[in-house]
Amino acid sequence: MANKIIAEWQGREYDHNPKSTDWYWVLGIFTVASAIVSILFSNFLLAFLIIVAAITIALHATKEPPLHTFRLVETGIMIGDDLHPFARMTSFSVLEDIEGEFPPFLSIKTESWHSPHLTIPLGGVDADMVYAYLLQHVDEGEHHHTLTDLVAAWLGF
């Protein structure tokens, strides 16, 4: 049985901020210094993990996030072809930028171990309508930015 689409919009998981050459130099210097300290303490595995993590961060910094299609349907929220049903959601909140510089985000906590926290941009859709519809199906809760969100923002992601 197909779900009736209540609202549909597109958005990116995060805004892509191109990194400067200086950003990569700082990453490289920090990586080399950390790896040398790890080697001096005979912790070769940590040195290897630091280098792999730095390479992963550098590759992620160059990549532009894909454009996702979000659908609010009768039984939940679809991200692409993946359905996140209301029954597995524990709470939601709409996070808004005080200055109004960025569109609001929908923060959803779920019971899923694979994706326990969903952050969905609400640009291109009526955020009040999405809020009102979700309020009928899921409890509203107070959500704060996670430590991962804060570290990613500090790194410029």
Image: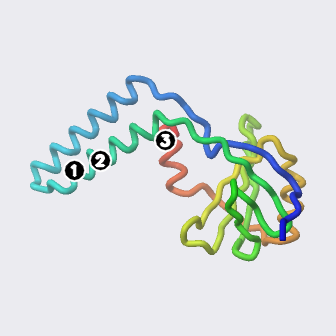
- Residue matched to label 1: 48
Quarter occupied by residue 101: top right
Front one among 41 and 6: 6
Kind of residue indicated by mark 3: Trp
Mark 2 and mark 3: Cα distance apart in space: 20 Å
Q: Which residue is mark 2?
A: 52
Q: Pick whichever of labels 2 and 3 is earlier in the sequence.
A: 2
Image position of 90 with respect to 9: above or below: below
Residue at 83% in and 62% down: 73
Q: Secondary structure at mark 2?
A: helix
Applied colour scheme: rainbow
Q: Residue at x 63, y 74 (%)?
A: 111
Residue at the front extreme, as displayed: 1
Type of the residue with mark 2? Val
Query: Residue 154 has which mark?
Result: 3
Residue 130, above or below 2: above
